[in-house]
């Protein structure tokens, strides 16, 4: 009896204790969460200046620029009357005379405002040859009004061509898929479906493929060259390793332009490389290394090597030699040990290095411009051309957008395969 | 360290004797005149002769840098001797790469493969030996069961505690049933409690499987509790090789005497040698009779006496009696240590019962039998670390 007493007494006490402990635990968790939230806010606050700077100088401009790929109000703003007149048109054949009259009036207005050239250029981007037609018509309309203006319009065959009015109509909508489709060598056909542009007009798919091919080749070359070098650096005594690292990083200390220029000196027809190849008798004639794909890949590989090598090296350095020793002692031959113990552990570094190089290669501009031939220009060279020469920012934006989407998709795939946390960039 | 001595299982001493007997003709592992130099100027291992018997638990014990790891690495095949031969089951292994030696090895930092699960880690030596998947599964399960890690099979090494990782490393080194397992300070990273627990487990596995184990440690109590025999390393050579009680009770050099267990060391000069015994004039006054272990007439010597061999009881006839004053008392629960200052100002530690009542400053007489005092030559350079002593099996 007396032995039972304490346990009977104990039970409610215990229960009370437990619930008290439970609430204690809850309040502890809550407090912990509050504390963590505070910590996170504080660290966010520290990063805030950088985040604001990034948003202002990087995020917003990119969004604005990319939006030009799909948002193009030039034609709609220049042709308000035509926009109204075409609102009910079904896109078949030619629109009614009111549309011709409205366009004539809009063109005269543009002439008066001095925006005719802008309009001509914008239409020309969508309809090759439109520029001269627009400017010619504007001149004809100078002294014509009403019926005369209508006749002046009809006298220019361009305005009665089958593709002209559908293009104008699509231009009057401020949102357009035209540039994005063009960036992939696609267009709307007359039935409202999407089709490939004729082969003689197709350029960008080929350029994208070329860009990916060059990027992949360079990535592979840097991996083949960089992996053994990283292994050596990670396994030699410290002093020697430091010297080798400096040797790898040395090119970083000169500008990319200088490095590229150096390669033009080496690769040109009467340059050192050709001299050497002739001297040792590998080549019987001087090779066209400049302005060639091979030369481009060689130069890019040189520039990209540290980007591939460093992440691999930094991972290799963390793998203790006892890992391979353990594998040997467990009966693995050197190759098996390397494949099953070393490679899997270096893999995140290899992936990170390759990804870095691949993505950087997609955006290469100076090196292809200086070393590549006409058929070695990469997508960035086209984007630059649209920005600087053609002043067609919409097309530049569309190409950039497609490139960005590809890059992000690639990054997503890598991150998915590997897990973002395992991607060891440095 | 008499405590660890007391718990030493009687069985292991028997094995040690058997091992020593068996080692006579041809050892399981044999080092013959093995030398190793990394830089061509200094020797990490000098002229080593060592025989390990089949089924033996041999520990290499020694201070840092004394060549234990180097010895183990040469046996495992990671380093090549610069001189001499190592034979394994009668076969010279100089040209045999590590992956063909069939030796299990447990590394100090475990060297588990972080990208594999526990099961994959343990299965690795089997899969590189082309064992079938089903066989691997059963054998891995069996060995994981043995190290009591059955439920952790699909975890990664980083998700395990230090002791668990240690057991995975052990399982991995045992799963392919090597006849020789090497362990380089496998318990060095564990806390004291876990270390003692793992010592027992390793010992049990050794008894159960009958494998030969060469074990490296610089923890002398670990060496004494676990081993059949211990090789005490000093300066790249074996200072003494013997069973734990040999090493504790009959150290052959001043280095071994002070490295293993606690010792009082008295400095003096040998006055005269008579038979096994010698009379030593202590520096600063006083005399003592001791066993002459290498000490020669008129040479400087060190006399080593264990604290538990000293007594405050009246000296028996023929025993040494040294007048002293109590200089301090250290209470340790089950016993007490008295610091007794001799007339020549040297301080002896005396182990007495916890009930001892001597007060500081009290005059006492410290006594000990000559058999418990060992006189070694004072020069540590020739104090028994001579390579030729390696063969004292
Ligand atoms: N790879 C190496 N290169 C050069 N010298 C070495 C190398 N490994 C060990 N040594 C030297 O050889 C000697 C013995 O080293 P070893 O590693 O065998 O000692 P140890 O007994 O295992 O010591 P610890 O208890 O500290 O592990 C040391 O003087 C050490 O400096
Ligand atoms: Mg060591």
Image: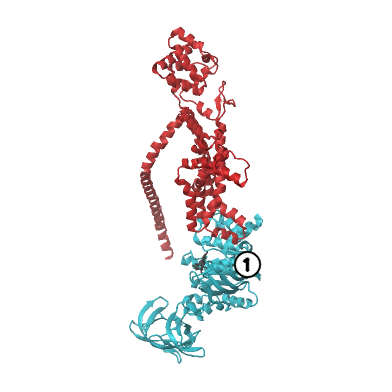
Chain colours: A red, B cyan
Asked whether, in this view, residue A57 is left or right of residue A293, the answer is left
User: Can residue B115 be seen?
Assistant: yes
| Residue A377 screen position, x and y as percent | 53, 34
Q: State the residue in front, A16 or B213.
A: B213
Task: Report the front residue among A131 and B68.
Answer: A131
> Relative to A378, is A354 above or below?
below
Q: Give the crowd class for mark 1: few <14, some 14-19, many >=20 residues within 10 Å.
A: some
Choose top left, top right, bottom left or bottom right for residue B96. Answer: bottom right
Tell me if residue B242 can be seen.
no
Front in this rendered view, residue A374 or B9: A374
Q: Nearer the viewer, residue B186 or B296?
A: B296
Query: Where does the image place residue B20, in percent across and percent down from the top left?
Result: 60, 77
Q: Position of residue B12 (x, y in %)?
A: 57, 75
Residue at horizontal 49 percent and vertical 33 percent from the top: A400
**Label 1 near ligand 1 (CB < 8 Å):** no
Does dot 1 land on a helix, a strand or a loop?
A: loop
Q: How many marks?
A: 1
Q: Work out which residue is located at the far top of the displayed protein and give it.
A: A147
Q: Is residue B95 left or right of residue A35?
A: right
Quadrant of res B120 = bottom right
Pointer 1 chain: B
* Residue B165 coordinates in the image, percent (x, y): 52, 60
Q: Identify the residue under disc 1.
A: B94
**Left or right for A310, reference B206:** left
B259 relative to A56, above or below: below
Q: Quadrant of the C terminus of chain B?
A: bottom right
Q: Is residue B305 above or below residue B29?
A: below
Q: Which residue is most to the bottom?
A: B317
């Amino acid at each position: 009896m007396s032995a039972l007493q304490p346990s009977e007494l104990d039970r409610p006490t215990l229960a009370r204790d437990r619930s008290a402990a439970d609430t204690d635990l809850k309040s502890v968790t809550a407090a912990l969460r509050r504390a963590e939230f505070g910590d996170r806010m504080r660290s966010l606050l520290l990063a805030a200046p950088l985040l604001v700077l990034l948003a202002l100088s990087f995020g917003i401009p990119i969004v604005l620029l990319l939006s030009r790929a799909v948002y193009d109000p030039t034609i709609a703003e220049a042709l308000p009357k035509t926009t109204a007149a075409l609102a009910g048109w079904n896109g078949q054949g030619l629109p009614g005379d009111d549309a011709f009259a409205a366009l004539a009036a809009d063109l005269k207005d543009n002439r008066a405002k001095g925006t005719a050239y802008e309009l001509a250029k914008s239409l020309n981007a969508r309809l090759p040859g439109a520029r001269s037609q627009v400017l010619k018509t504007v001149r004809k309309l100078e002294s014509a009004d009403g019926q005369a203006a209508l006749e002046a319009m009809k006298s220019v065959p361009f305005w009665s061509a089958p593709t002209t009015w559908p293009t104008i109509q699509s231009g009057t909508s401020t949102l357009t898929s035209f540039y994005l489709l063009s960036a992939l060598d696609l267009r709307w056909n007359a039935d409202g479906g999407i089709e490939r542009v004729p082969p003689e007009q197709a350029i960008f798919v080929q350029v994208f493929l070329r860009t990916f091919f060059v990027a992949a080749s360079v990535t592979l070359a840097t991996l083949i060259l960089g992996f053994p070098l990283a292994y050596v650096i990670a396994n030699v005594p410290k002093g020697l390793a430091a010297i080798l690292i400096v040797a790898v990083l040395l090119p970083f200390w000169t500008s990319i332009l200088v490095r590229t220029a150096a390669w033009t000196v080496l690769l040109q027809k009467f340059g050192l490389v050709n001299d050497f190849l002739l001297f040792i008798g590998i080549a019987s004639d001087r090779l066209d290394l400049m302005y060639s794909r091979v030369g481009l890949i060689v130069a890019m590989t040189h520039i990209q090597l540290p980007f591939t090598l460093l992440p691999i090296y930094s991972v290799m350095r963390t793998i203790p030699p006892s890992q391979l020793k353990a594998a040997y002692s467990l009966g693995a031959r050197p190759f098996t040990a390397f494949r099953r113990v070393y490679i899997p552990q270096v893999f995140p570094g290899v992936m990170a290095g390759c990804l870095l190089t691949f993505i950087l290669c997609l955006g290469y501009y100076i090196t292809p411009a200086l070393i590549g031939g006409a058929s070695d220009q990469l997508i960035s060279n086209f984007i630059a051309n649209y920005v600087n020469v053609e002043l067609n920012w919409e097309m530049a934006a569309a190409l950039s957008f497609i490139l960005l989407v590809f890059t992000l998709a690639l990054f997503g795939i890598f991150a998915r395969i590997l897990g973002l946390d395992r991607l060891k960039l440095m | 360290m008499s405590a660890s001595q007391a718990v030493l299982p009687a069985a292991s001493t028997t094995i040690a004797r058997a091992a020593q007997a068996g080692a006579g003709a041809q050892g399981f592992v044999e080092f013959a005149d093995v030398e190793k130099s990394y830089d061509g100027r200094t020797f990490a291992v000098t002229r080593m002769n060592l025989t390990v018997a089949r089924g033996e638990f041999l520990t290499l014990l020694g201070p840092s840098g004394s060549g234990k790891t180097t010895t183990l690495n040469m046996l495992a095949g990671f380093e090549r001797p610069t001189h001499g031969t190592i034979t394994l089951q009668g076969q010279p292994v100089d040209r045999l790469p590590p992956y063909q030696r069939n030796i299990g090895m447990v590394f100090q930092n475990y060297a588990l493969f972080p990208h594999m699960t526990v099961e994959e880690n343990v299965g690795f030596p089997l899969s590189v030996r082309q064992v079938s998947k089903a066989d691997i599964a059963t054998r891995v399960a069996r060995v994981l069961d043995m190290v009591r890690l059955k439920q952790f099979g699909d975890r990664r090494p980083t998700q395990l505690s230090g002791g668990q990782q240690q057991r995975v490393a052990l399982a991995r080194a045992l799963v392919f049933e090597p006849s020789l397992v090497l362990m380089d300070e496998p318990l060095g990273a564990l806390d004291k409690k876990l270390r003692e627990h793992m010592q027992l487990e390793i010992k049990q596995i050794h008894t159960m499987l009958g494998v030969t184990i060469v074990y490296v440690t610089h923890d002398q109590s670990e060496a004494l509790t676990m081993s059949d025999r211990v090789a005490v390393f000093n300066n790249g050579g074996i200072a003494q090789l013997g069973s734990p009680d040999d090493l504790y009770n009959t150290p052959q050099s001043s280095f071994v005497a002070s490295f293993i267990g606690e010792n009082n060391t008295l400095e003096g000069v040998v006055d005269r040698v008579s038979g096994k015994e010698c009379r030593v004039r202590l520096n600063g006054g006083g005399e003592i009779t001791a066993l002459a272990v290498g000490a020669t007439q008129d040479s400087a010597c060190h006399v080593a006496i264990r604290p538990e061999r000293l007594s405050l009881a009246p000296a028996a006839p023929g025993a040494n009696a040294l007048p002293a004053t109590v200089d301090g008392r250290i209470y340790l629960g089950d016993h007490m240590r008295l610091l007794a200052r001799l007339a020549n100002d040297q301080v002896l530690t005396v182990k007495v019962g916890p009930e001892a009542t001597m007060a500081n400053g009290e005059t006492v007489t410290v006594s000990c039998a000559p058999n418990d005092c060992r006189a070694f030559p004072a020069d540590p350079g020739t104090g028994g670390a001579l390579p030729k002593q390696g063969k004292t099996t």
